[in-house]
Amino acid sequence: MNTKAVAATGATAGECFARALAAKDPGALRALLADPVNFGALTPGRHWEASTGRQAVEEIILARWFGASDHITELCSVTSGRVLDREHVAYRMRVRRSGRDYLVEQQAYYNTEGPRITWMRVLCSGYQPVPE
């Protein structure tokens, strides 16, 4: 989704980020993230940081968190809000990995300049197995 489409839909940058992530759309992620972007995240096993540009964030998100063999089958929910000057988005996805279904939830706080995310912090639940 390009930056003009964000404004046209009325969706927040965070909501568009969640949709781009669920679609594993590198072009949409690049369009949403400023360059440079100050990015930090905490997953169950590691702390992640990038400040060298959108490419680094794209590589962390699409190559490490949700790799080629991970199939995001559904964006289950997206909610957004604000904490004064900071924006918030929470999203939950169903992911198929190694023949098994998982739920992954992430909470993100972020700042924007215009339509682009300039600062973002993400907290991830990790891959939670869906009972069969």
Image (tube, rainbow, N blue to C red):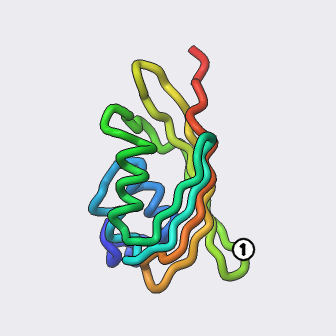
Q: Considering only vertical position in the picture, is 48 above or below 43?
A: below
- Tell me if mark 1 has few (under 14), some (14-19) or many (20+) residues whose alpha carbon lies within 10 angstroms of its own: few
> Residue reaching furthest left?
27
Q: Residue at x 30, y 57 (%)?
A: 26
Q: How many marks?
A: 1
Going by the image, does 53 lie left or right of 128? left
> Residue reaching furthest right?
84
Instruction: Say if residue 89 shows up in the picture.
Output: no
Q: Secondary structure at mark 1?
A: strand
- Look at the image and tell me in which quarter the N terminus lies: bottom left
Q: Amino acid at mark 1?
A: Val
Q: Nearer the viewer, residue 14 or 110?
A: 110
**Residue at numbered disc 1:** 83
* Residue 29 position in % (x across, y down): 36, 62
> Residue reaching furthest bottom?
114
Q: Residue at x 67, y 82 (%)?
A: 85
Q: Residue at x 46, y 20 (%)?
A: 100
Going by the image, does 49 lie left or right of 9? right
Q: Nearer the viewer, residue 33 or 54?
A: 54
* Residue 13 position in % (x across, y down): 48, 70
Q: Residue at x 58, y 25 (%)?
A: 129
Q: Quadrant of residue 103?
A: top right
Instruction: Say if residue 86 shows up in the picture.
Output: yes
